[in-house]
C-alpha cells in the first residue's frame, strides 16, 4: 500500500505538524514501507488467536482511592510555554 | 406532514471519588486553579497511570443499577485530539469493550412506564477547564479537573420527546444519587449531557440525519435546546431542505442552537488500546458482592410503593425521586398515617414550602410524626381539612406539634350542633334573597351558603354537619 500526498497531509495536520514538500515526499515513502512490512505480517494465519492489546499478561493493576500530594502550582506551570501566576495561557480559543 | 423526534443522550457523570482516576491528586471542587495536578494528570513524559479501584467499582454499581451486562473483560483506549484543556493530546477513555453494555432504565411519562435502553457505560478521564472571559487575545487553562473520573452513559435512540429526555436524565440522576456515585449537581457540571437529535416523518422506520448538541448542563437547557432543534429540523425538511450532520451548541442568551465553529478534522480520533494500562477482568463473585451491597433502587422502590401502598405511578415516581424523600414518606406510613393522605401532603404543601425555602427534605423542619399526628386530628374530627392547611403551615414554621397549635390558636373544629345551627340560622337571616332563589331552583347556591357559614365560624365548623343542617333547613 502506498500513501498518497493527501493522506500524508491529513496525518500531518492531525498531528499539528507542518511539513515541507520534500518532507511530505520523504515521510510518505517511509510510512509506505512501514505499511508494506505490516502487509507481510498480515499474511500470518492468526485464526483462533485472541488479539493482543497488551504485552504483559497482567490485569487489574489498581490503586486505592486515597488522595496524595499534588505538585506546587509553580512547578506545574513552569514547563509551559506561557502562563500567568495561576493559569496556563494559550491563544484565544473561542471568538 | 407530521414528524417524530428521535433522541439519544450521552450523559457524563463525575464520580464521587476522593482521588483522580489514574493518579493520587484530589478531586475537590473549587480549589485554587492548578493546585491539584501532578506529572501523571498533566501528561509529563514517562509517567504511568494506575486505575483507581473505586472508579471501577462505581461503574459496575451503575451498570447493575441500570440492568446492564457487566463485561468480564474490559480495557481502556486512547482518543486522540488536540485541545488546550487536554495536556496529553489524548483522553484515556474506553472504546471497544466498555465496562457495561445492554442496559435500560424505566421512566414514567403521563403516568405510563416506558423503557429507555442503555447502549453502554464507560469510564474515562475528564479534561481541564478553559476560561475565555477577560483575557483579551488569550484563553486560560485550569487543569485541576484533568483526570477527574467520569462515567459516560450512552442511551439507545429510544427517546421521542424533550419531556422524555428530561425524565430520563432525572431518572439517571436519581439512580446515581441513590448509589452515591455522583452528586448529580448540574450547576457545578458534575452531570452534563450531549444530545443526538433527528426527526423523521411519523411512521417511517429509518432514522433521519442527526445533529449533536454539546454540553447541556441543566434540565431546562436540555428541554429548551431539544425543542428548538426539533422545530428547526422540521422547518428545514418541510421546506424541502437537507439536515446538515454537525455538532451544535446551545446559545443560552439567544435561545437557539448554532453550529459549533471549529476547524477540527471531522472526528478522526484514531482510537487504539491504551498501552499504559493493563486490561480489567471482573469476576462474577465481585459483581455479586457489589450487587448485595446496593440499596433498594428507585424503580424497585417505585413498584413497591404502587403495589404495597396503593399509590398512583405519579405519586410513587415523585416520592422515590430522592431516597431521603422516600424514607420520610415511609417513616410517616410506619407511624400509622394513611399512605395516600401522606403522599398528598408531601406533594402539595410540603414540597411547596421546601421549594420556597430551597430546603431539601433532610432539612425539613416538619417531622413525619408531626404530619401523622395532624392527620389523626383530621380523622377524629378535631380539625377540618381546611383548617389543617393552616395548622400544617404553623407546624412547618414553628416546629410545634399540631395539638398545641390547635389549642393555642383556638382552631378546634366546631362539631357542636347547637353552635352550627345558630350559624346556619344567622346566615339564612342575612341572605333572604339567595335563600329565595335557592328555593326557586338555583341549587348551585348551596356552595355559597356553606362558604358563608364557614366564614361565620372562621372556618371551624364541621363541613359535613354544615351541609346536613343546611339541607334540612332549606328544604
Image: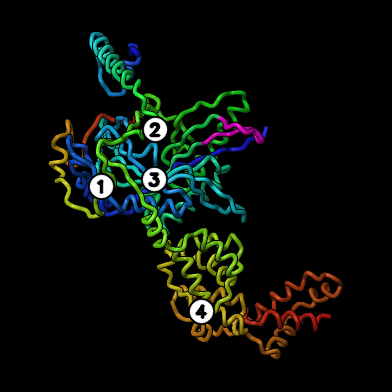
Magenta stretch, residue numbers = B197-208
- Which mark, residue B99? 3
Label 4 to label 1, Cα distance in Å? 50 Å
Residue at image coords 76%, 73%:
B446
Q: First in sequence: mark 4 or mark 3?
A: 3
Q: Secondary structure at mark 1?
A: loop
Q: How many neighbours does mark 3 have within 10 angstroms: few (below 14), some (14-19), or many (20 or more)?
A: many
Residue labelled with disc 4: B335
Residue B306 lies in the magenta stretch: no
Q: Secondary structure at mark 2?
A: loop
Label 4 with label 2: CB-CB less than 8 Å: no
Residue B203 lies in the magenta stretch: yes
Residue at image coords 36%, 35%:
A50
Q: How many neighbours does mark 1 have within 10 angstroms: few (below 14), some (14-19), or many (20 or more)?
A: few
Residue labelled with disc 1: A61
Q: First in sequence: mark 1 or mark 2?
A: 2
Of B135 and B12, nearer the camera is: B12
Q: Is residue B425 above or below residue A54?
A: below
Residue labelled with disc 2: A48
Whether callout 4 and callout 2 share a subunit is answered no
Label 4 to label 2, Cα distance in Å? 64 Å
Residue at image coords 30%, 30%:
B82
Nearer the viewer's eye, disc 4 or disc 2?
Answer: 2
The quarter of the rendered structure image containing the C terminus of chain A is top left
Label 2 with label 3: CB-CB less than 8 Å: no
Q: Say whether residue B120 is visible.
A: yes
**Mark 1 belongs to which subunit?**
A
Label 4 to label 3, Cα distance in Å? 43 Å
Of B29 and B390, nearer the camera is: B29
Amino acid at each position: 500500500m502506498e500513501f498518497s500526498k493527501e493522506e500524508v497531509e491529513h496525518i500531518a495536520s492531525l498531528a499539528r505538524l507542518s511539513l515541507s514538500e520534500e518532507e511530505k515526499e520523504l515521510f510518505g515513502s517511509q510510512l509506505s514501507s512501514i505499511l508494506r512490512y505490516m502487509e507481510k505480517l498480515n499474511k500470518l494465519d492468526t485464526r483462533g488467536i485472541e488479539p493482543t492489546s497488551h504485552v504483559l499478561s497482567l490485569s487489574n493493576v489498581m490503586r486505592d482511592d486515597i488522595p496524595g500530594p499534588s505538585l506546587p502550582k509553580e512547578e506545574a506551570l513552569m514547563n509551559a510555554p506561557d502562563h500567568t501566576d495561576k493559569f496556563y495561557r494559550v491563544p484565544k480559543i473561542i471568538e | 406532514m407530521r414528524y417524530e423526534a428521535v433522541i439519544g443522550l450521552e450523559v457524563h457523570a463525575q464520580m464521587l471519588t476522593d482521588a483522580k482516576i489514574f493518579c493520587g491528586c484530589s478531586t475537590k471542587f473549587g480549589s485554587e486553579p492548578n493546585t491539584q495536578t501532578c506529572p501523571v494528570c498533566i501528561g509529563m513524559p514517562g509517567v504511568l497511570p494506575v486505575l483507581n479501584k473505586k472508579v471501577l467499582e462505581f461503574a459496575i454499581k451503575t451498570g447493575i443499577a441500570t440492568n446492564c451486562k457487566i463485561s468480564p473483560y474490559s480495557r481502556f483506549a486512547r482518543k486522540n485530539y488536540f485541545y488546550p484543556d487536554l495536556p496529553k493530546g489524548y483522553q484515556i477513555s474506553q472504546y471497544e469493550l466498555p465496562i457495561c453494555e445492554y442496559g435500560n432504565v424505566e421512566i414514567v411519562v403521563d403516568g405510563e412506564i416506558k423503557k429507555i435502553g442503555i447502549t453502554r457505560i464507560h469510564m474515562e478521564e475528564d479534561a481541564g477547564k478553559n476560561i475565555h472571559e477577560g483575557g483579551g487575545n488569550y484563553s486560560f487553562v485550569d487543569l485541576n479537573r484533568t483526570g477527574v473520573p467520569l462515567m459516560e452513559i450512552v442511551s439507545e435512540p429510544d427517546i421521542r420527546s424533550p419531556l422524555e429526555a428530561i425524565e430520563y436524565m432525572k431518572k439517571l440522576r436519581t439512580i446515581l444519587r441513590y448509589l452515591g456515585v455522583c452528586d448529580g449537581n448540574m450547576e457545578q457540571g458534575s452531570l452534563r449531557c450531549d444530545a443526538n437529535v433527528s426527526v423523521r416523518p411519523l411512521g417511517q422506520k429509518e432514522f433521519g440525519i442527526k445533529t449533536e448538541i454539546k454540553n447541556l448542563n441543566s434540565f431546562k437547557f436540555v428541554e429548551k435546546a431539544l425543542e428548538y432543534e426539533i422545530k428547526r429540523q422540521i422547518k428545514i425538511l418541510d421546506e424541502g431542505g437537507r439536515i446538515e450532520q454537525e455538532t451544535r451548541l446551545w446559545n443560552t442568551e439567544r435561545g437557539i442552537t448554532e453550529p459549533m465553529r471549529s476547524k477540527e478534522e471531522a472526528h478522526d480520533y484514531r482510537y487504539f488500546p491504551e498501552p499504559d494500562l493493563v486490561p480489567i477482568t471482573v469476576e462474577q463473585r465481585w459483581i455479586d458482592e457489589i450487587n448485595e451491597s446496593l440499596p433498594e433502587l428507585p424503580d424497585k422502590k417505585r413498584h413497591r410503593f404502587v403495589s404495597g401502598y396503593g399509590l398512583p405511578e405519579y405519586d410513587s415516581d415523585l416520592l422515590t425521586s430522592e431516597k431521603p424523600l422516600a424514607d420520610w414518606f415511609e417513616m410517616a406510613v410506619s407511624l400509622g398515617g394513611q399512605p395516600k393522605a401522606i403522599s398528598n401532603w408531601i406533594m402539595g404543601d410540603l414540597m411547596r414550602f421546601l421549594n420556597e425555602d430551597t430546603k431539601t427534605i433532610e432539612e425539613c423542619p416538619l417531622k413525619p410524626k408531626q404530619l401523622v399526628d395532624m392527620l389523626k386530628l383530621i380523622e377524629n374530627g378535631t380539625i377540618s381539612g381546611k383548617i389543617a392547611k393552616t395548622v400544617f403551615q404553623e407546624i412547618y414554621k414553628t416546629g410545634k406539634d399540631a395539638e398545641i397549635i390547635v389549642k393555642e390558636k383556638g382552631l378546634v373544629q366546631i362539631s357542636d350542633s347547637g353552635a352550627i345551627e345558630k350559624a346556619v340560622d344567622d346566615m339564612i337571616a342575612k341572605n333572604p334573597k339567595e335563600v329565595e332563589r335557592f328555593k326557586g331552583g338555583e341549587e348551585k347556591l348551596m356552595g355559597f351558603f356553606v362558604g358563608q357559614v364557614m366564614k361565620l365560624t372562621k372556618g371551624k365548623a364541621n363541613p359535613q354537619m354544615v351541609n346536613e343542617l343546611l339541607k334540612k333547613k332549606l328544604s
